[in-house]
Image (cartoon, rainbow, N blue to C red):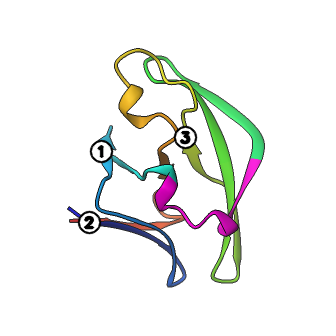
Amino acid sequence: MHATARVNGTTIAETDAYKIVDGNVYFPPSSITKDNFSSTATHTTCPYKGKASYYTIEAGGHQLNDAAWYYPEPKSGFEKIRDYVAFYKGSVEVKAE
């Protein structure tokens, strides 16, 4: 089990301990290259996972606004993805094997 996330060939996350929820690969917070991420003021709410927070990604010469999200306090049943980071398909190339 190995997953990578890349922007224009630049690896921004890599792990052997990812989770898959709703078809999205969630990377543990320790697996992201923190220099490429900055918190934003954006929040959305999933009725069953809770309130999501977002990151803008800067990598490979691109700035991708709100292209990554995580749940700092997920609802009951989704604790396994607390602070794990997922990426918008199309913005970030994610491969999981």
> Which secondary structure lies at badge 2?
loop
Left or right: where does residue 92 sit relative to residue 80? right
Q: Position of residue 80 (x, y in %)?
A: 36, 32
**Residue closest to the far front:** 30
Place residue 53 in its image quadrant: top right
Residue placed under numbered mark 2 in the picture: 2
Q: Residue at x 48, y 64 (%)?
A: 90
Q: Which residues are magenta?
A: 30-39
Residue 20 numbered mark, or none: 1
Amino acid residing under circle 3: Tyr
Q: Position of residue 66 (x, y in %)?
A: 67, 51
Left or right: where does residue 92 sit relative to residue 20? right
Q: Position of residue 65 (x, y in %)?
A: 71, 57
Q: Position of residue 77 (x, y in %)?
A: 34, 19
Q: CA distance from mark 1 to mark 3?
A: 13 Å
**Within-10-Å neighbours for mark 2: few <14, some 14–19, many 20+:** few
Residue placed under numbered mark 3 in the picture: 70
Whether 10 is drawn above or below 48: the answer is below
**Within-10-Å neighbours for mark 1: few <14, some 14–19, many 20+:** few
Amino acid residing under circle 2: His
